[in-house]
Image (cartoon, rainbow, N blue to C red):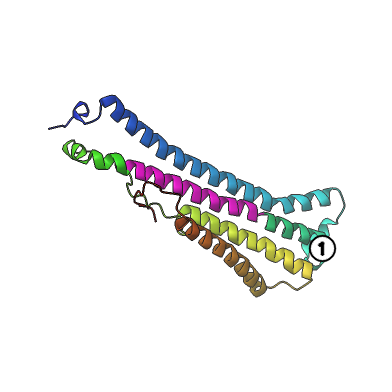
Amino acid sequence: MPGRADELPVGPAQFLQLVAVDFTGIYSVYLAAKDERLKMTRLSMSILSAPFAAAVALASAKVIDPASLTTWHTIPWYLFAIVLAFGLLGLVPYLRLIEAVAAHTRAARAINNFRLLYVARLRDQFADMEWSPNLPVDPRFPETYAPLAWPGVNVMILAVANGGYVACGVIGLSGATPNALLLLVIIGLVALVQYLVYYVRANVTRRRKVPSNPYRFENVET
């Protein structure tokens, strides 16, 4: 009964290399995904903090009176324009974050498919050794659209933050009197548009056009 690594149908060196490559691959994918999300979140926070830095700089240079920043109707129009501009600019890391999540999800699915290959071939040997890879072997996992997972929550928080900046900028430039209902409506509409972009992009990724398959291999990914 092949209960040891040297009794497997592949050589011990090749078996260890296979396992090492597999674990290194999945680890690198998730490290890259985490790093990309952190970078885009930091970039978004930097963009959204720019209007505050601009207001401080203008007040320090005595271009504007700091007292004018204490009342909505005395705030200069160009500060509202800055807020609106950086709120729209915040869409760049938002969209990049969606693309990064989708790209790393596809990479993780490819690694799951690779793991499925050797787990299926060495299933009996693993059972004899009472060992399991303890990692997903489903090439349809993880889902690209997962709004309650951390990447999805991160995306939606950025959407609401961008919506808040756009709402303040639009109301300020229009000269309207701000109130809670108006702010909530505009923030909700802007966040909804961004959510629809996330939803459509995630589902298009899931049902994207499959690459050319001249050898007619079965497509196991959704």
Nearer to the camera, 56 or 168: 168
| Residue 109 falls inside the magenta stretch | yes
Q: How many marks?
A: 1
Which quadrant of the rendered structure holds the C terminus? bottom left
Q: Amino acid at mark 1?
A: Trp
Residue 17 visible, this angle = yes
For image coordinates 49% across by 53% down, the residue present is 151
Residue labelled with disc 1 = 77
Estimate the x, y position of residue 154 in percent, counting from the top left: 53, 54
Estimate the x, y position of residue 146 in percent, counting from the top left: 45, 58
Nearer to the camera, 68 or 205: 205
Of all residues shown, which one is farthest toward the right?
Answer: 63
* Side of 209 relative to 119 (left or right): right
Magenta stretch: give its range.
90-115
For image coordinates 40% across by 34% down, the residue present is 24
Q: Quadrant of residue 12?
A: top left
Q: Quadrant of residue 125?
A: top left
For image coordinates 33% across by 41% down, the residue present is 115
* Side of 125 relative to 214 (left or right): left
Which quadrant of the rendered structure holds the N terminus? top left
Q: Is residue 15 above or below residue 108?
A: above
Kind of element beneath mark 1: helix
Estimate the x, y position of residue 35 in percent, counting from the top left: 53, 41
